[in-house]
Image (cartoon, rainbow, N blue to C red):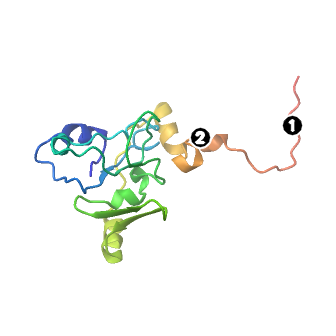
């Protein structure tokens, strides 16, 4: 599990990384608020120590996006993203993550009481911006399942108000 892109970049090829061919790589804080935006960070590389063993694919899970020219077993555009408290915010190294593609099921195999304790202990990370467009983005961007658009641009319900006069 990697906390963010910088953590992934720093540790992915560390020979002491606790990862096997059966591991699931999880990248947190890579969604529309946490990255910010939807960068193509989901092209998570296979760790060098596994490549040397002949591993060419493994499950990778991320809040981010990925180019259609990439490869492999990836679950992307997860919403709500980990940065705002989505389910991946509760993942820890060593957790069992089960992916059943035909059943469209992704499951974190952690006891309910442990997840509740993690949820209670979770605190939102510090937002990277304190002013300007960055703050506007952080406060108003929607999650991936809503299109990563600004919430104030969404169509509002018709209220029968006349259009303003154009002069």
Circle 2 residue: 150
Q: Which of 142 and 53 is in front in this view?
A: 53
The spot of residue 45 in percent (x, y) is 28, 39
The residue that appears at 36% across and 75% down in the rendered structure is: 112
Circle 1 residue: 163
- How many neighbours does mark 1 have within 10 angstroms: few (below 14), some (14-19), or many (20 or more)? few
The spot of residue 25 in percent (x, y) is 29, 51
- Locate the C terminus and report the quarter of the image it occupies: top right
The residue that appears at 41% across and 37% down in the rendered structure is: 130
- Distance from label 1 to label 2 (Cα)? 22 Å
Residue 41 drawn above or below residue 95 = above
Q: In which quarter of the image is residue 50?
A: top left
In terms of secondary structure, where does tag 1 sit? loop
Q: Is residue 136 left or right of residue 21?
A: right
- How many neighbours does mark 2 have within 10 angstroms: few (below 14), some (14-19), or many (20 or more)? some
Query: Which of the two marks, 1 or 2, is nearer to us in this view?
Result: 2
The residue that appears at 15% across and 48% down in the rendered structure is: 17
The outermost residue toward the top is 167
Q: Earlier in the sequence, mark 1 or mark 2?
A: 2
Q: Nearer the viewer, residue 114 or 105?
A: 105
Residue 16 appears anywhere in the view? yes
């Amino acid at each position: 599990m990697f906390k963010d892109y910088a953590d992934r970049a720093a540790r992915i090829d560390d020979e002491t990384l606790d990862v096997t061919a059966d591991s699931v790589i999880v990248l947190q804080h890579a969604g529309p608020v946490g990255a910010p935006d939807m960068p193509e960070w989901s092209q998570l590389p296979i760790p060098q120590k596994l490549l040397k063993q002949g591993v060419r694919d493994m499950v990778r899970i991320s809040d981010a996006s990925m180019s259609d020219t990439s490869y492999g077993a990836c679950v992307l555009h997860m919403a709500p993203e980990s940065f705002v408290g989505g389910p991946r915010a509760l993942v820890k190294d060593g957790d069992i993550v089960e992916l059943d593609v035909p059943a469209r099921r992704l499951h974190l195999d952690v006891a309910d009481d442990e997840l509740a304790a993690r949820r209670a202990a979770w605190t939102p990370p510090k937002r990277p911006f304190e002013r300007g467009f960055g703050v506007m983005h952080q406060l108003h961007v929607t999650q991936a399942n809503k299109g990563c658009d600004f919430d104030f641009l969404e169509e509002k319900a018709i209220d029968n108000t006349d259009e303003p006069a154009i002069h």
